[in-house]
Image: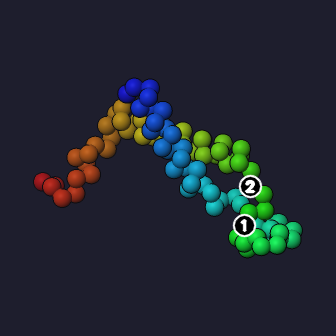
Amino acid sequence: MEFSSIAAIYFLFFAFSAFILLPFGVRTDEEAGTQRVAGQADSAPHRFDLKRHLLKAALLGAVLFAIYYANWTYGWITPDDLDFYHRR
């Protein structure tokens, strides 16, 4: 696998992980015990730590990519294994 393919696939796992992790570990102003800003949604986060979120996404993306790459290298699950319509 070429480096450009590795980088592109890792970026896809990273972006997927970033969106999946968005609702986890975020507290609202009510949960934090502070007052909301006028016009703010009830569900708005109290404080969003972008660096920490991106670090978590990078780590999860690396783990998912490692599993993907191991499967690509060793062939544990192949496209034939996922063909549910033409089973023999």
**Callout 1 secondary element:** loop
Q: Residue furthest left?
A: 88
Q: Is residue 33 in view from this perspective?
A: no
Task: Please name the amino acid that badge 2 sits on.
Answer: Phe
Q: Position of residue 45 (x, y in %)?
A: 74, 63
Q: Residues within 10 Å of mark 1 (few under 14, many from 20)?
A: some
- Dividing the image into 4 quarters, which one contains the N terminus? top left
At 44% from the left edge and 32% from the top edge, which residue is drawn? 6
**Residue 40 found in image quarter:** bottom right
Q: Quadrant of the C terminus?
A: bottom left
| Residue at the spot of label 1 | 44
Q: CA distance from mark 1 to mark 2?
A: 10 Å
- Which residue reaches farthest front? 39
Q: Could you tell whether 14 is left or right of 70 in the image?
A: right
The residue lying at 74 percent from left, 50 percent from top is 49
Q: Is residue 37 above or below residue 59?
A: below
Give residue 81's position: percent from left, percent from top: 25, 49
**Residue 44 pos. (x, y %):** 72, 66
Mark 2, residues whose alpha carbon is within 10 Å: few (<14), some, or many (≥20)?
A: some
Q: Residue at x 76, y 67 (%)?
A: 28
Q: Is residue 20 visible?
A: yes
Q: Residue furthest right?
A: 34
Relative image position of residue 52 (x, y in whole percent): 71, 46
- Residue hosting label 2: 48
Q: Amino acid at mark 1?
A: Ala
Relative placement, left or right, of 34 versus 67 is: right
